[in-house]
Amino acid sequence: MSSPQRDITLRFLAEPQDVNFGGKVHGGAVMKWIDLAAYACSAGWSSRYCVTVYAGGIRFVSPIHVGNLVEVSAKIIYTGKSSMHIAIEVNACDPKSLNRRLTTHCIVIMVAVDESGQPVQVPTWIPKTDEDKEQHATAIKLMEMRKKIGEEMQIFV
């Protein structure tokens, strides 16, 4: 039996239809790519259809230009019963130079579901390296922070 796939990188060229009025790739296109990578990563880990339940901490660090080679890397950093917390990093470069630069990063939480849309259990990810353990601990801290933010946000519901 093969082990689940923990990470994935999607690569493609930024196209003219991805550009905003300022001549750079717009944030909505980047967020779509992030969601696609998170889905591919979570489906690879769980062997199930997965849905996005949270995307947060999205930080746009530098712009992406038309013609840039874009890499969207996704990796599992925490698993719950049915959820998978995925760290996303977006890098871009001129394909002639291959000098990658960070453009965006965030956390996405996906949930594996069955045919009727009900959450189903996913394999447990166990951190092994020091970096994995640090990211796992950070995911737990972020969960606690999101609970507090969620409580505060109830005023808007």
Image (cartoon, rainbow, N blue to C red):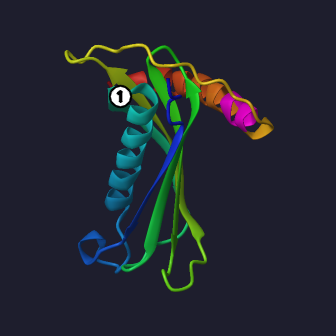
Prevalent SS, magenta region: helix
| Element under disc 1 | helix
The answer to whether 70 is drawn above or below residue 130 in the figure is below
Q: Residues within 10 Å of mark 1 (few under 14, many from 20)?
A: few
Q: Is residue 132 left or right of residue 57?
A: right
The part of the image, by quadrant, that contains residue 70 is bottom left
Residue 12 at what x, y percent from top left?
38, 67
Q: Is residue 71 left or right of residue 39?
A: right
Residue 22 at what x, y percent from top left?
35, 79
Residue found farthest to the front: 1
Write down the residue under mark 1.
Answer: 156
Whether residue 54 can be seen here? no
> Residue at left 35%, top 66%?
26
Q: Is residue 94 left or right of residue 101?
A: left
Identity of the amino acid at label 1?
A: Phe
Residue 64 at what x, y percent from top left?
45, 72
